[in-house]
């Protein structure tokens, strides 16, 4: 792609270790709650594959449970057994075959596990769910503190159980590599297990895994260090954080900068900056790009690449975030669901494709048809002003 003022930023490749991401646009991990026994199916292939066809540089699979009890709902993806490798590999292969880097988020839901799907009302699984064949399971956390008032109180992990969780993450990373993924993302956000250890609201431990920030960071840092040792040196390791808790008495941006520095020292290549999850489900958005300042601060003060997420819906805004050095990647969630071809449309909106070749980077299967339609549309003009066969102007 010829580099212009527009392509020099949002559509310039990003190198993370030896992985080159074709542009600065990523698909944020978004749970679809549509797996059976953690197994992906045709839905996941089609759902995720359209983002690669749509021009995204990086596609991150949804929170994928490192253990059955680490799922948010019974419909979550899993990677706790070797049987998961083959169906996950099918997805990774498709994404890579169509130009996107393929990443997978490794997760344990901790105190927020064993819940209903959102369209079933959310909240803890109950008797009606059990009658449907989806019985609740015990939850775990840093401390015996319910994630939400009225929810089941989780079991506080013992040291031996913590060690077992570490090994579950390491085994999941090994399987992710066997499936052919280009990157893994460690989920330390949104009130799930590792975030529950990080937050002073949910972590009331008095051993080496609790207390001050150094203690609360211990488990996520141990896992990050083990993942970096397991994951190939040439491939990147990402971490998603909640930069601040939903309650101001919890994790602060200062805490997150300190955590990011420790992660970078252990070989983490990029911090994916979200927010909320402990004390409130998410921080309340007050403006477009409301979480971008977290990514900008971590990038500037921790010296590590970042990914910004949260109500970035306009190509010019995304372009400015990267151009101004606030983040290295822009992750789209609901915006990507609404328009899986957002990057291709953004290229056109920003003039990052030649005016005489506006479909240059579209998949060839679509490009030839769209190019062929162009002259006809030019001749007809906009629909709002087109005169039909009866000579009457069509209504707007």
Image (cartoon, grey):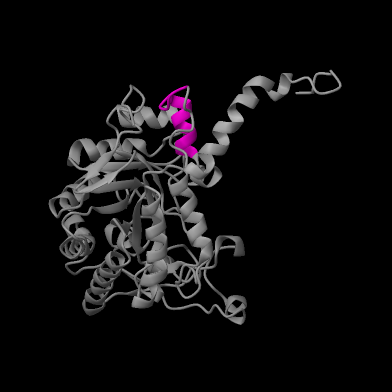
Asked whether, in this view, residue 47 is left or right of residue 278, the answer is: right
Does residue 49 appear in this view? Answer: yes
Q: Is residue 2 above or below residue 292?
A: above
Q: Is residue 295 inside the magenta stretch?
A: no
Query: x and y percent of residue 298 in the render?
Result: 24, 40
Comparing 279 with 82, the one in front is 82
Residue displayed at 28% across by 53% down? 239
Residue displayed at 33% across by 23% down? 4
Q: Give the residues in magenta.
A: 342-355
Does residue 243 appear in this view? Answer: no
Residue displayed at 36% across by 53% down? 96
Comparing 239 with 354, the one in front is 354
Comparing 368 with 49, the one in front is 368
Q: Is residue 250 above or below residue 220?
A: above
Q: Is residue 346 inside the magenta stretch?
A: yes
Query: x and y percent of residue 214 in the render?
Result: 17, 57
């Amino acid at each position: 792609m010829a580099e212009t003022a527009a392509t020099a930023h949002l559509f310039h490749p990003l190198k993370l270790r030896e992985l080159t991401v074709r542009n600065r646009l990523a698909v944020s991990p978004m749970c679809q709650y549509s797996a059976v026994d953690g197994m992906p199916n045709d839905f996941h292939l089609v759902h995720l594959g359209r983002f690669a066809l749509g021009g995204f540089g990086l596609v991150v699979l949804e929170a994928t449970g490192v253990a059955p009890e680490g799922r948010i709902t019974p419909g979550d993806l899993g990677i706790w057994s070797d049987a998961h490798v083959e169906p996950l590999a099918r997805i990774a292969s498709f994404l890579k075959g169509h130009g996107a880097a393929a990443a997978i988020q490794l997760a344990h839901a901790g105190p927020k596990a064993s819940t209903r799907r959102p369209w079933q009302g959310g909240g803890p699984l109950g008797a009606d769910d059990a009658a449907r064949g989806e019985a609740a399971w015990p939850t775990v956390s840093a401390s015996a503190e319910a994630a939400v008032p009225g929810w089941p109180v989780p079991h506080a992990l013992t040291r031996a159980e913590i060690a077992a969780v570490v090994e579950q993450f390491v085994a999941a990373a090994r399987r992710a590599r066997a499936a052919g993924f280009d990157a893994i993302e460690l989920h330390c956000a949104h009130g799930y297990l590792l975030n529950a250890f990080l937050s002073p609201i949910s972590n009331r431990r008095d051993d080496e895994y609790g207390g001050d920030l150094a203690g609360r960071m211990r488990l996520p840092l141990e896992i990050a260090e083990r993942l970096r040792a397991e994951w190939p040196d040439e491939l990147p390791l990402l971490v998603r954080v909640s930069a601040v808790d939903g309650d101001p008495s919890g994790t602060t941006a200062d805490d997150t900068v300190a955590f990011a520095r420790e992660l970078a020292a252990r070989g983490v290549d990029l911090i994916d900056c979200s927010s909320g999850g402990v004390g409130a489900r998410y921080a309340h958005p007050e403006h477009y790009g409301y979480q971008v300042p977290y990514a900008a601060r971590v990038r500037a003060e921790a010296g590590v690449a970042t990914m910004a997420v949260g109500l970035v819906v306009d190509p010019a805004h995304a372009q400015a975030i990267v151009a101004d050095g606030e983040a290295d990647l822009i992750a789209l969630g609901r915006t990507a669901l609404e328009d899986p071809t957002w990057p291709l449309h953004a290229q056109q909106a920003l003039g990052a494709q030649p005016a005489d070749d506006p479909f240059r980077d579209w998949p060839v299967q679509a490009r030839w048809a769209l190019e062929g339609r162009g002259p006809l549309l030019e001749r007809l003009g906009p629909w709002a002003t087109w005169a039909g066969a009866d000579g009457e102007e069509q209504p707007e």
